[in-house]
Image (tube, rainbow, N blue to C red):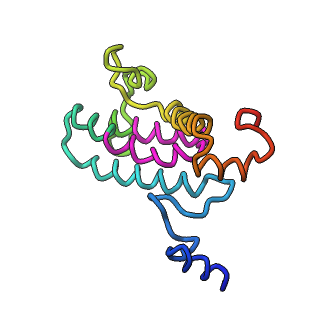
Amino acid sequence: MARRAAIAEVLGVRIVENQDKYLGLPTMVSHSKKVISSVVRDKISKKLQGWRGLLLSKAGGEALIKAVAQSIPTYAMSVFKLPASFCDELRSLVSCFWWGSERGKRKIPWIAWSKLCQPKCKGGLGFRDYMSFNKALLGKQSWRLLTNSESLMSRIMKGKYFPDRSFLEA
């Protein structure tokens, strides 16, 4: 504990407890992503519940989904590969909001969600597919590791996860 305090003093940072959050996510994450998924799910669910009572047009609902519900998990997705089941759960939450419900009964989804995720020029609404977006953000991080091998992040990742080989070999 004394060493920890000394390091914090030298670096000029405060000591963070395990329960603290950084950018909306817990600072300590185990191999299980359940903590992350519950935080993200709860945030999106609370936002969607708050909007249900509003009389929104379809254009207003589309804007809210794109601006809020699909941007909340962006940081988590750029850092962690989220399970497919969790991405499906998020899609289901957003889909239920989009199509609506009455007295706990879901309304009929008239178009497949995959079609709504297509760009507007192809007849869709441009909603994000959570799995594809997660892969794209992780691919972006991978590209940074490959092209900026001397950056601090690259050196830390290499030292921790693949010290004796290249990123592609790991």
Measuring from the top left, give residue 135's x and y in whole percent: 56, 33
> Which residue is at a point 39% across and 43% down the rendered structure image?
71
Q: Quadrant of residue 107?
A: top left
Q: Is residue 22 left or right of residue 7?
A: left
Does 125 lie within the magenta span? Answer: no
Q: Quadrant of the C terminus?
A: top right
Give the main secondary structure, helix, strand or loop, of the magenta stretch: helix
Q: Can residue 138 be seen in this view?
A: no
User: How far across and down, in percent of the image, does residue 61 sit?
Assistant: 26, 37
| Residue appearing at x 45%, y 55% in the figure | 42
Query: What is the quadrant of residue 66 in the picture?
Result: top left
Position above or below: 53 against 165:
below
* Picture coordinates of residue 131, whole percent (x, y): 54, 33
- Closer to the camera in the image, 103 or 40: 40
Residue placed most toward the observer, 2 or 67: 2
Rendered residue at 77%/47% (across/down): 163
Of residues 69 and 6, which is closer to you in this image?
6
| Looking at the image, residue 115 lies above or below residue 152 | above
Report whether residue 49 is seen: yes
- Range of magenta residues: 67-95
Residue 89 part of the magenta-drawn span = yes
Query: Is residue 92 positioned above or below 160 on the image?
Result: above
**Residue lying at the far right of the rendered structure:** 164
The answer to whether residue 129 is left or right of residue 120 is: right
Residue appearing at x 57%, y 39% in the figure: 148
Query: In the displayed structure, does residue 119 sit left or right of residue 164?
Result: left
Q: In which quarter of the image is residue 59?
A: top left
